[in-house]
Amino acid sequence: MKKNKIAILGLILLIVSSCSKVLDPYPNGDVSGDELWKYEEMVEGLIGRSYEYLTRNYDDNEGAYLDCATDNAVNTSTTGNIRRLAVGTLITSQDIFATYWTRDYKGLYQVNIFLKDRRGYNTRFMINERFDSLVRNRLQGEAFALRAWFEWDLLQKFGGKGISGQMLGFPIVLEPLSASASVNLSRDTYDECVKQILSDCDSAYKYLPIAHRDFLVPVVTDRVYAGSRYWGRMDGITTRAVKAMVYLTWASPRFNPGNDVSRWDSAAVNAKKVMDFKLKVDNISGGFNPVNAVSFLNPNFPGIVFAARYQDKNDVMERMFYPGGFLGNGVMGATQELVNAFPMATGYPIDDPANRGNYDPAKPYAGRDPRFYSNVFYNSATAVRATTTTVMYTFENFEGGKDAAGASSSNSRTNYHIKKFVYMGLNWSDASVSKQPHSKFFIRWAHMCLTFAEAANHVVGPTDLTRYGISAKTAIQYLRGRKTYDGANGISPVFPLAADAYLTEVAGLGETAFDGLVKNERRIETCFEGMRFFDLRRWTTDLTELNKSVHGATVVKNPDNSFTYNLNVEVEPRVYNSAYLPIPYSEILKMSTLEQNEGWAGWN
């Protein structure tokens, strides 16, 4: 592996020319270089500032919008850049991911200043030796963990097969460099990048507490410098979760052509560590409980493993998702493909050959899995005020209805609108509009259950209990057995685990069949979180699955007020010439050795 890599020229110039902006949170924004080390608050600020490079909600091109480049959703705007990506018309000047490349390297610059020559770790932060040790170890661990996080983000977004045919990652940067440095970077191999991320995770783990919880800090006076006051910062269990996600991608067919089973095993082992922590340590009174519904509006939701700093009470997601008729912007809509992925309330898919779930195409939204009602608004669905039975709005997605596709530029093109992340107590017609905080849950309990289930199944099949202590089937049972918010009375009934005959049936069919079920569970659990874009790519080895058209519904209201549904209306094609995102064109122009990913002709 190449050592002591150098930072990107454009990034270096940006940082050096605007040091005060990079060091904004410190008391004296004009302090930089060696002067920085005279002020322990500024040294600590290197790490605090790094968290500002993490997105804080789902309202961007790496969150909900990214699902519009998959078979989960369609962007309402036909001229938006995410839609251009999806239909194969994105040009260099419209690159919506270049900003993330720059952001990640800015974050790396910050943490590398702290880590270089252990100067951050050797800074004296507190007079009291014990307190100083708590602070120094936490900051050193956070620096390594954040470096792993930025590296993982770069690998997931920009890792891919170069035009040379080699699987490449990103240029590994382990040191901050001055503006006088000679710059012409090349990308390290994909495997080298994986190993660097894993190494940084392990380095972080040596310094960090397993989690930031008061009950894990027995000496009460230590809680001034440890414990729950650091909720939301990197901790030891988060590094295990990051390793699980890295291994899962590295084990997947696109990046593991030889099917090295040890990678699947490592993904399962690390995911299981996170699951065990949640179940056996965090499962305290008032803490984590696996049956509880996910609350995206609670920045302290116990199911969080790692989340962004929350944005205070706001209406960003509601504005995004509600249609124009309810004073929203309707920026995107769910596809029919996603709607079809939700099973029936009995657990059987809607296309079960024997129709054991009693799916009725004339009433396609009746009797579905409760998770469907938590994620999607459909024709005749109601927006019911939280904790009441008061109907605030009824969706009219039928032809001629106020929410139908084409009736307004603020209506979805698929005749489905999105409910996930929406606070059901918000109504802009109220005299006093009630809003809730929003944040992005980067890693949560469900993600680790899905990671474990997928990985363990590829190692020992669906039902083996001996290798990991639980089976892949058990991990999926946790998800299918949770409560879920229904938007009306708070929480819907628990999915009938004891009667989940379909899960048992598929688990009995073996690895391949169960893998299909896990992938579907992952799809519906993580919809609109920006994960499916990368899942589809790691699962496939060609472009066939990526280049399928997506569909919506048309609804006709009959004279007797019943409805007739056409659920196979093509809305938009998907056109990809590459399974990978492009390396930013501006960086390719700067560095002759920076290799572009295959399939991006004209971006070299």
Image (spheres, rainbow, N blue to C red):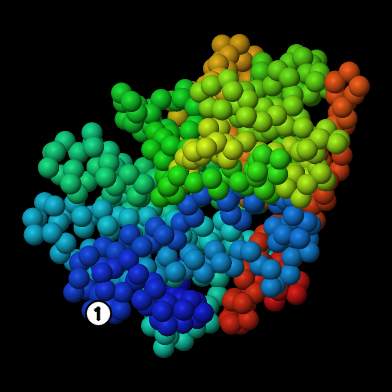
Residue 512 visible in the picture: no
State the image coordinates of residue 148 (x, y, percent, origin top left). 42, 57
Compared across the picture, whether 209 is left or right of 476 comes to: left
State the image coordinates of residue 257 (x, y, percent, origin top left). 65, 51
Compared across the picture, whether 141 is left or right of 454 comes to: left
Number of marks present in the image shown = 1
Q: Nearer the viewer, residue 351 or 427?
A: 427
| Label 1 sits on residue | 34
Outermost front residue:
431
Outermost top residue:
499
Say which residue appears at 22% left-offset and 73% top-offset: 37
Say which residue appears at 50% left-offset and 81% top-offset: 9
State the image coordinates of residue 274 (x, y, percent, origin top left). 41, 37
What type is the residue that disc 1 sits on?
Answer: Asp
Q: Callout 1 environment at 10 Å: few (<14), some (14 to 19), or many (20+)?
A: few
Say which residue appears at 65% left-offset and 71% top-offset: 596
